[in-house]
Image: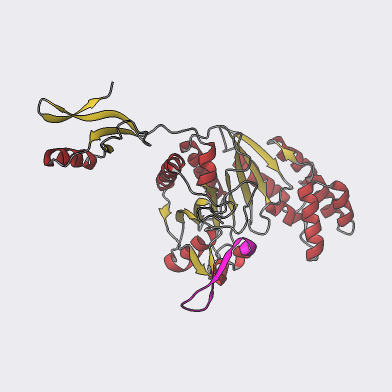
Amino acid sequence: MSAWLLPDHIADVLPSEARNIEELRRSLLDTARGFGYELVMPPLLEHLESLLTGAGEALDLQTFKLVDQISGRMMGLRADTTQQVARIDAHLLNRQGVTRLCYCGPVLHTWPDRPHATREPLQFGAEIYGHTGPEADLEALSLARACLDVARIRDVTVDLADVRIVRALLSGFSVDQETLRLVFAALAAKDASELAVVTQDFPSHSRDGLLALLQLYGDASVLKEASDRLGHLPGIPALLAGLQWLVDRIDGCQVRLDLSDLRGYAYYSGIRFAIYSDGASDALVRGGRYDQVGAVFGRDRPAAGFSLDIKQLALVTPARPLKPAIRAPWGDAADLRKVISDLRARGETVVCVMPGHESEVQEFQCDRELAMVNNQWSVRSIV
């Protein structure tokens, strides 16, 4: 095997793409800071039990594992950062009230999570802890949309669901895990005949409600239909009202709802959202409420947030213009080196042209040049 070959779904990032990714990273972090989110940097490597406890259990098959040569304990390379940020909130910060945290760094997956995806996403995310109300859900969604705005992704669709609706329909009676699995599979496939068979021994209100969910998807009018069909069931009106409250505050984009959508059922504890764009084959952003995320660390705090892969986002963002730069001759004369140093200190990009390489293409737009004019170095436009 050639030494330069990389593992499947692992790739180098070359200059043009790397520039776009890095500019996106900076703009997303600046956007989060504008909302009051503080940056944290969890380690790439942790003890396995810390990464895979509680909500992290679902990541077991996605996590690379190895033995720590110092302690002999099993360690893991993080497949998601949310669990680590919950640990930071619970144990290292231990603040009272609302805490807003954001992060950005690589995660590693044993398998790509969708066709043609990288196994090394660059994950950006934001979490708000300490507030149980819908205001936190709305803030997480608003920040996610602001991040797509700065990435110049304009035409988006927001998908909404609430896992508590299915939970409300399954409350009040005992259901074994295998039957639950079959119910969830039938709902995901929108298979009415299979769902009818699996739920034949359920209470009538639960069975009828679950079957009704299969038709409750579409635009915001779905909530009115859901209220007509399910509004008499305990707990359902408040959940539908919560979705309506959120829909009423989302403007400038299309909103879709699917009340039988159970993606992330074991992870999310309330509202769940995904944001799509016409140029992407999968959701660009996923988020929602996950109140139990910090429970295994001893602080069961309310939590809402989202995450995205900057590498995936970079594939669908419009091309960014090259950064303006100054072309300068190479030389070791003290006056030339001083002028170049001063220009760089002022924030200019100065590309020194090596002798014999004057026409080579750079990852910069040299729109000016440093030239000797009237016995002094001056910056002038390139015609």
Q: Tell me if 229 is positioned left or right of 346 in this view.
A: right
Whether residue 175 is visible: no
Please report the residue visible at 81 percent of the width from the left and 57 percent of the height from the top: 182
Q: Tell me if 41 is positioned left or right of 57 in this view.
A: left
**Number of numbered discs overlaid on the protein picture:** 0
Q: Nearer the viewer, residue 380 or 131?
A: 380
The answer to which quarter of the image holds residue 184 is: bottom right
Percent coordinates x, y for residue 240 in the rendering:
69, 45
**Magenta stretch bounds:** 58-75
Whether residue 29 is visible: yes
Q: Tell me if 113 is positioned left or right of 376 in this view.
A: right
Please report the residue visible at 68 percent of the width from the left and 53 percent of the height from the top: 163
Percent coordinates x, y for residue 272 in the rendering:
63, 49
Question: Which quarter of the rendering shows the C terminus?
Answer: top left
Please report the residue visible at 53 percent of the width from the left and 67 percent of the height from the top: 299
**Colour basis:** secondary structure
